Image: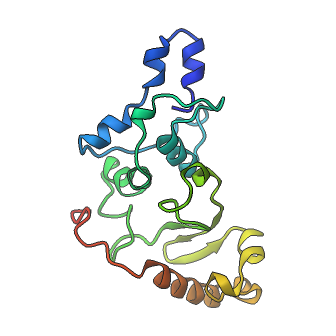
Amino acid sequence: MALADNYRSNGLDPGRADVMVRMGDVESAGISYSYHSDMPMAPGQPLFLMWSGVNRITNDGNLRGPEQRVGPLGALKAVTLDAAYSMQLEKEVGSIVSGKLANFTILADNPLTVDPMKIKDIRVWGTVHEGRVIPVKGVATSQATAADGGLTEAAAVDDGALSLALAARLAELAGHRHGGVHESY
């Protein structure tokens, strides 16, 4: 998707280059798919990969193959649930459920509700790795305010307090159940 302009100018027919990575067709057919990176050829940035699938904008800013765009939920699953499924690790990772490793990224905004053109610009607040909260240095402390669920500068220093504040905020933000979606995961 992001490299379609390059392929157009380096030997591939424009009609073929524009519809490379036909994830819209795959999603419409109900087939599981995942996004990944062939580093160093493409960036290993899940939010950029999601943005590319949702918007189909090339590195040069051109819209290519708009009929092959996917929805934000499909793109999110492509870097979480369905990525784990592709690696046959869906029983260990890919979703936040009891019995799986508690490894996930904490984002400053919701990629399902933000303007699709801003998905790649969502800041990463931190991660949770095996249940331990790991804020990104400089981001968590500078952005932590009462509006962020009571996180404070002091909480960012104390991992225990930060973990409790983050857990409370996540519970508040979640406020819903995921019943019925990918129950086999």
Horizontal side of residue 75 vs 10, given as left or right: left
Nearest the eye: 78 or 88: 78
Vertical relation: 65 (above or below) 28: above
Where the C terminus falls, by quadrant?
bottom left
Q: Residue at x 34, y 44 (%)?
A: 33
Residue 117 locus on image (x, y percent): 59, 48
Residue 30 against residue 10 in the figure, above or below:
below
Q: Residue at x 51, y 41 (%)?
A: 55
**Residue 118 point in image, percent of width and height:** 61, 53
Q: Position of residue 10 (x, y in %)?
A: 58, 11
Q: Residue at x 24, y 40 (%)?
A: 29
Residue 102 image position (x, y, % from top left):
45, 72
Residue 147 horizontal side relative to residue 174, left or right: right
Tell me which residue sits at (57%, 53%) in the image: 119
Side of 116 where 65 appears, left or right: left
Q: How many marks?
A: 0
In the depicted view, which residue is nearer to us: 147 or 67?
67
Colouring convention used in this rendered image of the protein: rainbow
Residue 73 lies in what quarter of the image? bottom left
Identify which residue, 155 or 92, lies in the foreground.
155
